[in-house]
Image (cartoon, rainbow, N blue to C red):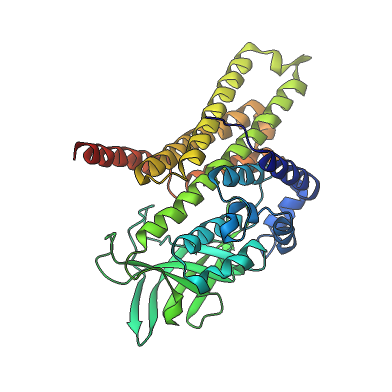
Amino acid sequence: MNFEHTEDRRMLADSLNRFISEQYAFDARDRIAKSDHGFSKEIFQQFAELGVIGALFSEADGGFGGGGFDVAVVFEALGRGLVIEPLLGAVMVGEALVVAGNGAQKEKLADIINGVSVVAFAHDEADTHYERTRVSTRAERSGDGWVLHGAKAVVPQGEQADLFLVSARTSGNVDDEAGISLFLVPAKTAGLTVRGCPSIDGGRVAELAFDGMKLGADALLGTEGQGHATLERAIGRGVLALCAEALGAMEAAKAATLEYLRTRKQFGILIGSFQALQHRMADLLLEIEQARSAVINAAAAIDTGDRVTRERALSAAKFSIGRIGALVAEESIQMHGGIGMTWELPLPHYAKRLVMIDHQLGDEDHHLQRYIALGKESGKEVAA
């Protein structure tokens, strides 16, 4: 298999990395992260104009990429720059629209790709622990439409979203796979309450509350009660994006640590000459290459037609990223010493982001258990 990027992807990566280095320096990013909006709409629009969002979608859907490696290239660059603009929501909600949307619903993709519409993925609830099938928010039929009751937690950039993709139960018990439906909810819908707060790694998140919120029949995405498969595809794209973002953050932390070892002196001697630190750094470089291999494997598998192969590769990557990300965060800070804990330095912000990526869309323990379960499922299929 040829793991080299195409010329188009290399050009996209070069353009995006250059734009981020010139327009998204750490000081600018820090101001954006602490702002009331939690991200810059101007920067988000510039990403769209550069074709960054379009690279996440196929030509058939109005973009010019859409493959797993396109997603990986974009999000690795975003991770290297600690970018907090809502591109994760775009790739996840966009994937759901591609998989299950009707003609009218797919027309929303144009506004997403052009940066006109900010979209957010609202699935997690306060009493869930990464379980994809655990949905207590309920949707009941009302005439030709629906009425929603419930709440969603930790929705990235939810305050500024124009459109939400919301999961709700239309039948079955709270943990059933069947009976989950997906709804497209405009932010200005009556009965929707959005309450935001800062997130620990920059930007803002929101809680959504649905108090008898009424939706029309056209809000239902896909078939009633059969939203789990679409949910799995959307989360899968999000997992790949997060893994690639973490890889970019690891590369940035590695580069900062190498530079520090090459310039910091103790007792007149460069600390990079100490054999103990050399060994630790060598181990770290090997671990980061292992993470890269996991991301490549996930990017290659995400477009395959075999569900178990795809989902196992994604869970394997997320597990690896969680473990290695924590190691990179810890080792980088320790090799910097006390200065590694100062907020004025970019490094601790990369460390925080790496730790928080582990907790998005399932931590390493969750994905290890899922990887094992999918292996058993695959074994049963082979035996049958």
* For residue 215, above or below residue 199: below
Q: Residue 160 appears in which quarter of the rendering?
A: bottom right
The residue closer to the viewer here, 376 or 268, is 376
State left or right for residue 290 relative to residue 63: left
Residue, far right: 22
The residue under the point 81% across, 46% down is 22
Q: Residue 260 appears in which quarter of the rendering?
A: top right
Q: How many labels does the image show?
A: 0
State left or right for residue 65 relative to residue 384: right
**x, y percentage for residue 38?**
65, 61
**Residue 221 in view:** yes
State left or right for residue 239 relative to residue 30: left
The residue closer to the viewer here, 90 or 190, is 90
**x, y percentage for residue 312?**
38, 40
**x, y percentage for residue 204?**
60, 60
The residue closer to the viewer here, 325 or 235, is 235
Q: Residue 374 appears in which quarter of the rendering?
A: top left
* For residue 158, above or below residue 32: below
The residue under the point 50% across, 61% down is 98
**x, y percentage for residue 352?**
58, 43
**Residue 342 in view:** no
Residue, far front: 60
Residue, far bottom: 143
The residue under the point 51% across, 45% down is 240
The C terminus lies in quadrant:
top left
* For residue 262, above or below residue 36: above
